[in-house]
Amino acid sequence: MQYISTRDSSKTPNSFSDILLAGLAPDGGLFLPVEYPQLDDSTLTRWRDVLKNEGYAALAAEVLQLFIDDIPAEDLKAITARAYTYPKFDSEEIVPVSHLEGELFLGHLSQGPTAAFKDMAMQLLGELFEYELARRGDSLTIVGATSGDTGSSAEYAMRGRENIRVFMLTPAGRMTEFQQAQMFGLDDPNIFNIALDGTFDDCQDVVKAISADADFKRENRIGAVNSINWARLLAQVVYYVNCWIRTTESNDEKVSFCVPTGNFGDICAGHIARQMGLPIDRLIVATNENDVLDEFFRTGTYRVRSSEDTFVTSSPSMDISRASNFERFIFDALGRDAQRVADLFGTQVKAGGFDLSEDDAFETLSRDFGFVSGKSTHADRVATIRDIHERLGVLIDPHTADGVKVAQEWTAQTETPIICLETALPVKFAETINEAIGRDPEVAERFKDILAAERTVADLPNDAEAVKQFILDHPVEN
Ligand SMILES: *Cc1c(COP(=O)(O)O)cnc(C)c1O
């Protein structure tokens, strides 16, 4: 399988291992496979058996093999077997599905080590990076910015790995207690937490400034693990297959998914699964107050927000001003017209956005691609957490609550069961849970050590040069 950029009309092919460690394509586009492998009935039937008899990791290897031909199948099997294990994941099923009520189900993506769905992709990425770097005799310095979930998930996936260092910038004092403990409680010699004297945007600007210094970047093997990485999406395709299998008995049965999203990362994997022919009816996009995507699916207008217009909400992992994976979907929706995508995302988005409301493609988004959307606010998510807890005795986190709220609005108009993807555990967002149910969420035994651990973090000024010096001062220890 070869990969092309969403902005490259000449469709220059790239191999999986080439794009694994790359971020954006050189033309600023995102990588996608030249075509989506198509699932036939016998493959789906076989995958049911694989999940049942061999488990999630074996299913993941099956899915990955369709997209990766430059890693031998036995190696892929070993890689997924290391990535998805119990008790690293808190369930032997890795992604269990539970019944909520009526036609609503929960797909539990937050059983991983940091209790957020990012572990699903990051645990695989850690294994793939280590494998590929060893094969090349190379090393990697990951520099990232995080407002919470991505940073801890990346650190847990990369800790203790040879030839990988992680420098993670966080806005000083702005994460939840639990998120801080998760990151700063690690003391692995290859993990470096930096509390920057600034906001999350400042952290991102520092990361950009470091990447823009081509010499520094090359000499120090600087790389990223951001949400546009293709391997992260690929890892996520697997749980759509898993959730479909766990809620159906025959291959004719369709399900819908409702996905809380900001960056269009989680649901983009659902789009890919649907394009492959997985029996998915609807893909329901659920946003919070930062409703860039809901606005698009309702009106056809994609209007990116400025940082002043980006709200700080109680589902903070969806507080985005633009949806970085959205370009992949628009590429498919516009019949893979790379020139148009280059214009829309290379030019028009920089000037504020674009409008497809008059375009034929917009008319067919729901029919051909299954997409519909909805939005949830702070009051909605608090009310949903409280209601689901009171009536059903199930406690969900604020992001998941956004999804459940929107799914409830769509049940009457949807003919299939709806699987709401649970993206985090309540323990990460105690304040909002307390507001909803009047007490803090319980802290599971597996998180108690980290909450008690000593905190390791370097305080640095909001200055790219100071961060570069810190990186130089902490070389790979061998
Ligand atoms: C990252 C994150 C999301 C949103 O993910 P997208 O990539 O924007 O789809 C939702 N919920 C939680 C808990 C997250 O950490």
Image (cartoon, rainbow, N blue to C red):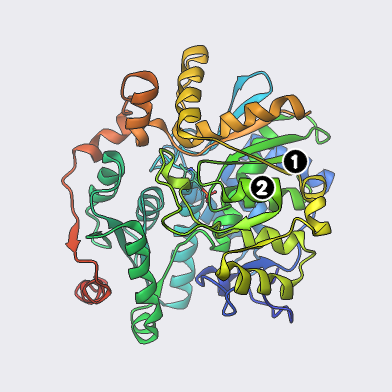
Q: Residue at x 66, y 66 (%)?
A: 32
Does mark 2 have its CB less than 8 Å from ligand 1? no
| Left-right relation of 243 to 474 | right
Q: Residue at x 63, y 48 (%)?
A: 295
Residue picked out by circle 2: 270
Q: Residue at x 70, y 26 (%)?
A: 411
Residue 473, quarter of the rendered image: bottom left
Q: Secondary structure at mark 2?
A: helix
* Amino acid under disc 1: Ile
* Amino acid under disc 2: Gly
Query: Can residue 10 be seen in this snapshot?
Result: yes
Evaluate if marks 1 and 2 touch, with contact meaning CB atoms under 8 Å apart: yes
Whole-angstrom CA distance, mark 1 to mark 2, is: 8 Å
Residue 30, position as x, y percentages in the image:
61, 68
Residue 280's disc is: 1
Q: Quadrant of the N terminus?
A: bottom right
Q: Residue at x 69, y 45 (%)?
A: 298
467 vs 371, nearest the viewer:
371
Residue 438, position as x, y percentages in the image:
33, 19
Q: Quadrant of the C terminus?
A: bottom left
Task: Count residues near mark 1 (Cα–Cα under 10 Å), then give few for <14, some for 14-19, many for 20+.
Answer: many
Residue 139, position as x, y percentages in the image:
38, 74
Residue 330, quarter of the rendered image: bottom right
Q: Is residue 143 above or below residue 256?
A: below
326 vs 50, nearest the viewer:
326
**Of label 1 and label 2, which has the lower sequence position?**
2
Q: Secondary structure at mark 1?
A: strand
269 vs 259, nearest the viewer:
259
